[in-house]
Every structure is written in C-alpha cells, then in structure tokens.
Image (cartoon, coloured by chain):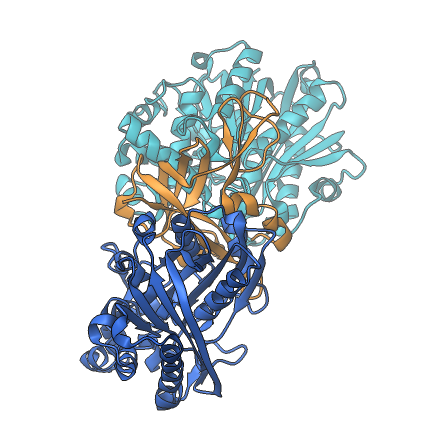
Chain colours: A orange, B cyan, C blue
C-alpha cells in the first residue's frame, strides 16, 4: 500500500528508471545522498536502459494479501546493464525460462490497486528477453 | 566499562497464545524473570519488538510494559531493529549497566503475531518498502534468493538443505517452551507446501506469540541475588544494506560477519572457543550462511557440514540447542532475548535434556531483515 | 507534409479462444467461429490496463519516430476503459515516457472511436502549426458481460501515433467525420458491462456511419476505391468490416492485411488503428491507405494516408503488430482463469 503522496514522489524512479551514478561506479535507483561505497556526495543522474541480467530469483507462492491474485509469481534480483541492483516482479514469463544469468527487460505495469477506491500503483516489472 | 551479568530469565510458552495479549505475554515473561532473580524493582527497562504497531496496533511499549509490570517511573523504551529487536534491546541493557548508568535492568522482547490477518506484509516491512516490498517480494522470497545462489554455486542439494530444520526439530523436542517440540523427517520437509521456491513451509520459522525477558546487573553484584548467573562476555552489533539486492555477494551477510568479529574481538575469543551457538535460523538457508559468517565453517561448506551432523551434539559445534527459530518458534521481537535465555540456561546447567555438556562459552546471533542488522553476544559461564 | 512520424502497437500475450467461451455457455463453437469470424482474442493480464497498454504502444511509436519525447506538445488517449473514472490516463503516460511537463494532455472517450478521435486532434494541432509533434493513442481493455455476444470480441490492445511535419512515414491526405446521436451501445456510470441494441448496432449504427463517412471521404478526395492498396475499418467482429468495405467498393485483398480481428478480437478504441499499424508494417512507399473507424453513440472518423519512403527506415525499429499477435509464447486461458484475470468473479477485498 502506498498512499498517494508517498507514491507520487517515487514516480521518477519507478516510471522512468531515473537513477544516480556515483564515482565508485555504484548505481542507485532510489534517491541517495551519499555513495555507500566511497562516501562521495557527487553523482551523475542517469536513466536506466531497462535491460539487465538475473542474479537470483524465486517463485512466490505465499504473498502479502496485496499480491494474492498474482500467486504464484516470480521475483528476481536484477543487475541492470548500468550496474544498478533492482528487485522486480517478473511478468509475461514462463517459470522454466527463469535462470541465473537470464537477460531481462523492464516493462511498465500495474503493480497493485489500493482496494476498489484507492489509487492504482504503477511501476516496473521485468520479463525474460527471448 | 563494568562487567555485566544476567541474573534471571523468563519465557512464555511459544505458540498460538490465543488468550494472551501483547501486554499479557510481556508481563508473564518479565514477572518470571524478576522472580528468578528475586527482585521486585528495576532501575531501567528495554523492550524489543519488531512491529507491535502493525501486529497489535500498539506502539509506546516502554510505557505500557513498565506500567503492567509494576515499574512506573523507570526509564522505559522500546528498541526496534526488525527481527533483531530483541538482541539489540539486550545490547542496550548491557550498555546501560556497563556504563554505570543503572544497576538493575529489565530487558525483554515480545511479539504478538497471531492477532493480524496479513502477517506476510508486516514482516516485509523489515525490507525496503519502496524498492523491494512494492515489487512483491516477501521474506521467504528474499531468503529463497539467497538459497538459489548458494545451492547453485556450492552444489548444496535440496535434501542437504532440509537437514537444517530436521536437526533443529530434533533439538526442539527437548525444549518445553518450543512451539513445535516434535521431529520431522526428510519426506515431511520435501513434501511441505512451497512458500518461495526453493524454500518450503518446513524451511521457514513459524508465526509465534511469545515473550522473553532477562534481568541484568553489574557482575560484582550478581551474587547478592542468585548463584545462577552468567557473564555477558562480549557484544557486537552491525548494520548492512536494507535491500537484499544491495548485498554485493548474495550469499554473504556482511553485517553478521562484522558483528561476529566485533564480539570475538571484545571477548578475546575465537570460533573454536565457542561451545554452542543460538543462530537466527529464520529460514534453513540462514543458519548455513550465518554459521559461515561467524567462522564456524568455511564459506560454501556449512550446508554439507550441518547435513553431516557437525552442528549437533557430538559435532564440531552445537547450533541451536533450543530448537532454533524453526522448532522453538519465532516471535520476532522476542527471539533475540529468547536466544540469550537459552544461553543462560545452558551456561547455568539448567537446559535439561538438551544440555550441552561442559559448556563455557555460548554465543547468540540475532539478525534483522535480510541481513540489514545483526547483533552477536558471547556469554560466559561463571 | 503532415502525417504520422512514428507508430506503435502493443498486444498482451494472453489469449482466449472463442471456442472456450462458447463451451462455457453451451453455444456451438463452430457457429461463433464462422458467424462472427472470431478465432481468439487478446486478454490483458492482471497487471495490464489501458494505461500500461498505451505506454507500451507509445514507447514503440517513440522508437520509430526517433524524437526527443520533450518535443511532443500534446498527448491524447482515447479509450472506453480508462482505469479511473476521475483522474487522467495520459498523465501517467507522459511521466512514464519523459514527455512534458510542458504538454497538453486529455483523455478521450467515444466508445470504439476514441482512438481516431485522439489522432484527429493530434493531427490538427500539428497542421495548425500550434505544435511540432502531437501523439494520439487508442487503447482498451474492454469488457463484455458474461454470456453476452460481446464476450467473444471485447479484447485488449492499443496503438499510438505521433504526428509531425518532419520525417513523415504516412502523410495524412484527407480526413472526414460523420456523427449522429444513435444509442446503439452504451455503458452507464458504475456499470461494469456495456449494454447494446443487438441488431440495432448494425445497419442504423455501424453501417450508416461508416458508409456515411467513407463515401464523403471518397468524394472529398476524388479518389476511387481501386486507387488504394489498403483499407481498414472498425472491427467489432469479423463479418462487419468485410461487408462495409465491400459496400464502399473495396475488395477483399485490400482489406486482408488490416483485418486482424479474427486473432485479436475487437480492441475498441484500438481496433481499426491497430489494423492500420499492421498495414504500415508491410506497406510500400507510395501506398495509399483508407481508414474509417466507428464508435457507438455514434460516429466515424475517416483518414486517407499515403506512405512515404521513410517507412523503410522505421518499420523495424519496434515490434510489428502481426508478430505480436502471432507471438509463439502466447498463453491460452481457460474460462476460469479468464474470469479471474478479468475480475468477473468477486474476490475478497484486501
């Protein structure tokens, strides 16, 4: 659940994959102020290309209620081509195609609905590139 | 710094405690601990709880618990560090006594987990809400992703992984406070329902109501109260990235390594000096990774070593004599304190059938999230 | 020259066969396949809606247009299934694609015609000189009531078109619209499924408006049906567009490329215009395309396009429509899965 104002401030990162590249090479999708590796406060704003590689994955059978209708669904830790680490739900993907090292691309999808009357949350999911 | 002793402990039954609220649980454990230490008043109180607000809609536990254990007026605060809340509360109590600020300190941990509908969501708040939970990940899911990489990299089989909960249930049989004091076999683990592939239900610690409390005092005063006391020889605490994906190596828990190193250094001890360890086996894979980070086994070898019997009585080190989180139960905020209680019972020779013989040094390792925080204590028999 | 500078479509990967639906309701599958000429239709997954489909289609249009999204002055999404009753779809899209904030955004609704409506307005902005580029999108995740004839056709998908003056892929030669108040199909506020007038949706609605618009467009342009390589019409089922095309003087060969309804269903605001993208995917420079949409209520928008040399440069820059429709990984649903995904069954609210 992300109430509207909390949701709105993450839009640049979730919709457009706006990220930060620090001098150490660390790339952060969430806003950061300090490079966790070098401590530098300098960074360059970049936009992730939306392509990456699976570092690990799982298939979730027991989810929070919010995602119950989607179970079983896959979630993966992905390293984007720019080096950002991102956790994403997989969509449009056969479980047999999930592999460590598989190539993925990000797609813009509905993440959840906040009940029947709340806002609809959008963001990135990933799918296997065949 | 002053040396610090544990002079009393209290536990509730771990399980589905339908008749007990969060305050009932805490009060039971706290009053038992005070009785065992033969004290009526404390100088300071710490309570560890992960998510009383979401589980029981109750924050402000310091005030509530001080009120309900007859200690109104004392400084009383809640300590939160996800699943390591309890262990971190013990550390705060230790610092309180060691610093000379207070003499008699009550430290407890409590979680009332069965009063909520969507417990998976509550636990997931220990992960990065905006960048992990938002995208559907669950705690079993995060540890499943650790298991996936570990199994692929080191060739650990699904059957070997199952030996962790099998061993812990075997230990738990002898723990009268355990939620599941019965044995499970390989078939049961492998046929239990899938939670987050490759982890199944019997790889996962359960949902548990429970509380645990300890009473601390300066070591030099311990004998005033009891002849059954132990020394807190060392404590190490560390933080790690909140998001699992930010762990450089997905099979490593850097905060555990750091906390362990700090504790060993403070104690002047090495892994081979430790007789038993209570580790945070929230999922089967966690026990393996933690055992490696704490230096009991080399990286990539703990899974097979545990499967070969190296982590039980007669092996290299006894891991989780209490039954661990898996068999004993995992009332999140209480777990870290309950580990200390187990170490106290072992080091004072009160562990009954699960007693580790001639135990001098016991370690506890309590971890938050997917390795975002960790606290390690080393206790010494007196 | 003013026209389409970039186009793109998006088709979900889930499908349900007409025969699966027919079996559910005890109908004869062969009668549906032959009568309505519908084999299967696209189904949006749980995580897809008009907004996500529009974003995916617009992304493909941007890939082909190869322009800085910031240069787009207007974005219009036409749909009868905007996810919100109040709150625009277009705002999500512009923020997802890096268009704006200096951009005019509006959501359109006109039953199945909202897509060409969006294109019409986008085109007019460029033509007036008001802006450099403007985008019109038609996309839907339409619902048919369980057991209703519409359930065989109502599908999901959409297409996006960027209009501009440079690097035009298909020039707009002529346009025409034809509108009257005809209550052949409607959906009231708070209603999940639309209602329709059965056979009243045919002659007095679909045929009257498409023929009215199409004939006027031919007259306005002074062109004859045989001068066109391609013709495409709104596709509520397989039969209607072929008949209306024939009535206007077009031949089957001119219509077959854009006639995707048999494997896609009726994507409402995305119907005729996704047929158009299928045509652009194969058209040659110089080819002329005749398009007339239809929206209940009722009205038709007509366009005459002429394809330019540029088509050969942009065609392969994004997925092609028939490739998406014939995706070898498409997943067929049974009726139970379909009913769940389309939320035709009541779930507990969490």
**Which quadrant of the structure image shows residue C7?**
bottom left
Outermost top residue: B268
Identify which residue, B41 or A106, lies in the foreground: A106
- Left or right side of A110 for B105: right
Residue B217 drawn above or below residue C36: above
Identify which residue, B343 or C200, lies in the foreground: C200
Residue C71 in view in this figure: yes
Q: Looking at the picture, how far across and down is residue B228, in whole percent?
A: 60, 22
Residue B313 drawn above or below residue B281: above
Q: Looking at the picture, how far across and down is residue C338, in whole percent?
A: 33, 67
Identify which residue, B310 or B228, lies in the foreground: B310
**Which quadrant of the structure image shows residue C2?**
bottom left
Task: Please give the name of the residue rendered at 36% of the width and 24% of the height, measured from the top-left corner.
Answer: B311
Q: Looking at the picture, how far across and down is residue C88, in whole percent?
A: 56, 63
Outermost right residue: B73
Identify which residue, C89 or B73, lies in the foreground: C89
Residue B342 in view in this figure: no
Give the number of marks. Answer: 0
Q: Looking at the picture, how far across and down is residue C98, in whole percent?
A: 52, 48
Residue C87 drawn above or below residue C186: above
Task: Please give the name of the residue rendered at 30% of the width and 82% of the height, measured from the top-left corner.
Answer: C248
Task: Please give the name of the residue rendered at 33% of the width and 56% of the height, measured from the top-left corner.
Answer: C308
Outermost front residue: C222
Quarter holding the N terminus of chain C? bottom left
């Amino acid at each position: 659940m992300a109430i509207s104002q909390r949701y709105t401030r993450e839009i640049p990162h979730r919709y457009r994959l706006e990220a930060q590249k620090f001098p150490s090479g660390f790339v952060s999708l969430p806003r950061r102020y300090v490079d966790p590796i070098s401590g530098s406060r300098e960074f360059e704003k970049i936009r992730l290309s939306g392509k990456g590689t699976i570092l690990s994955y799982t298939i979730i059978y027991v989810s929070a209620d919010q995602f119950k209708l989607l179970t079983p669904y896959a979630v993966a830790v992905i390293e984007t081509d720019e080096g950002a680490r991102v956790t994403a739900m997989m969509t449009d993907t056969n479980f047999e195609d999930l592999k460590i090292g598989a190539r993925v691309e990000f797609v813009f999808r509905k993440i959840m609905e906040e009940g029947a009357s709340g806002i609809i949350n959008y963001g990135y999911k990933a799918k296997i590139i065949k | 710094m002053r040396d610090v002793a544990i002079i009393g402990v209290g536990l509730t039954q771990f399980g589905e405690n339908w008749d007990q609220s969060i305050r009932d649980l805490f009060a039971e454990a706290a009053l038992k601990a005070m009785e065992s230490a033969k004290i009526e008043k404390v100088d300071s109180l710490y309570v560890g709880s992960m998510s009383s607000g979401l589980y029981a809609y109750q924050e402000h536990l310091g005030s509530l618990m001080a009120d309900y254990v007859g200690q109104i007026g004392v400084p009383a605060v809640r300590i939160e560090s996800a699943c390591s809340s309890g262990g971190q509360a013990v550390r705060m109590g230790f610092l309180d006594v060691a610093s000379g600020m207070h003499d008699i300190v009550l430290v407890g941990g409590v979680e009332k987990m069965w009063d909520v509908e969507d417990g998976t969501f509550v636990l997931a708040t220990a992960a990065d809400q905006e960048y992990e939970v938002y995208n559907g990940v669950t705690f079993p899911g995060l540890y499943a992703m650790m298991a996936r990489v570990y199994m692929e990299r080191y060739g650990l089989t699904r059957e070997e992984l199952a030996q962790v909960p099998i061993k812990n249930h075997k230990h738990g049989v002898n723990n009268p406070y355990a939620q599941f004091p019965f044995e499970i076999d390989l078939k049961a683990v492998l046929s239990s329902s899938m939670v987050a592939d490759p982890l199944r239900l019997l790889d996962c610690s359960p949902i548990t109501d429970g509380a645990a409390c300890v009473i601390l005092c300066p070591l030099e005063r311990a004998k005033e109260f009891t002849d059954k006391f132990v020394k807190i020889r060392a404590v190490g605490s560390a933080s790690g990235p909140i998001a699992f994906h930010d762990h450089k190596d997905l099979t490593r828990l850097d905060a555990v390594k750091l906390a362990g190193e700090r504790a060993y250094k403070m104690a002047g001890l090495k892994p081979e000096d430790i007789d038993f360890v209570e580790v945070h086996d929230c999922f089967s894979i966690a026990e393996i990774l933690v055992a490696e980070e704490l230096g009991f086994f080399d990286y990539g070898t703990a899974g097979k070593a545990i499967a070969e019997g190296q982590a039980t009585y007669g092996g290299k080190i006894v891991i989780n004599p209490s039954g661990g989180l898996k068999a004993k139960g995992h009332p999140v905020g209480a777990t870290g304190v309950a580990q200390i209680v187990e170490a106290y019972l072992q080091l004072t020779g009160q562990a009954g059938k699960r007693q580790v013989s001639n135990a001098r040094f016991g370690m506890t390792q309590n971890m938050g999230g997917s390795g975002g925080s960790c606290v390690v204590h080393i206790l010494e028999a007196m | 020259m003013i026209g389409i500078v970039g186009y793109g479509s998006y088709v979900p990967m889930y499908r349900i066969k007409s025969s699966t639906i027919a079996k559910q309701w005890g109908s004869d599958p062969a009668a549906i396949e032959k009568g309505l000429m519908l084999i299967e239709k696209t189904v949006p997954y749980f995580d897809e809606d008009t907004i996500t489909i529009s974003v995916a289609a617009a992304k493909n249009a941007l890939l082909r247009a190869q322009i800085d999204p910031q240069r787009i002055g207007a974005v219009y999404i036409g749909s009868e299934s905007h996810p919100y009753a109040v709150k625009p779809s277009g705002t999500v899209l512009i923020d997802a694609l890096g268009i704006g904030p200096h951009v005019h955004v509006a959501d359109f609704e006109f039953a199945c015609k909202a897509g060409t409506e969006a294109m019409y307005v986008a085109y007019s902005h460029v033509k007036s000189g008001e802006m450099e580029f403007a985008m019109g999108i038609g996309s839907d995740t339409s619902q048919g009531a369980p057991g209703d004839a519409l359930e065989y056709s109502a599908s999901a998908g959409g297409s996006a078109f960027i209009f501009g003056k440079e690097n035009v892929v298909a020039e707009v030669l002529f346009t025409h619209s034809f509108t009257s108040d005809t209550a052949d199909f409607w959906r009231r506020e708070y209603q999940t499924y639309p209602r329709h007038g059965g056979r009243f949706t045919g002659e007095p609605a679909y045929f009257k408006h498409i023929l009215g618009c199409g004939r006027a467009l031919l007259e306005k342009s002074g062109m004859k049906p045989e001068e066109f390589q391609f013709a495409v019409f709104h596709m509520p089922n397989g039969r209607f567009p072929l008949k209306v095309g024939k009535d206007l003087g077009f031949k089957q060969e001119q219509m077959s490329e854009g006639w995707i309804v048999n494997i896609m269903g009726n994507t409402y605001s995305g119907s005729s215009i996704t047929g158009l993208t299928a045509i652009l995917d194969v058209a040659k420079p110089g080819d002329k395309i005749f398009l007339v949409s239809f929206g209940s209520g009722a009205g038709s928008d007509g366009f005459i396009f002429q394809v330019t040399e540029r088509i050969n440069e942009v065609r392969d820059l994004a997925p092609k429509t028939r490739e998406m429709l014939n995706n070898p990984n498409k997943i067929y649903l049974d009726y139970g899965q379909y009913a769940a995904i389309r939320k035709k069954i009541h779930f507990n609210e969490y």
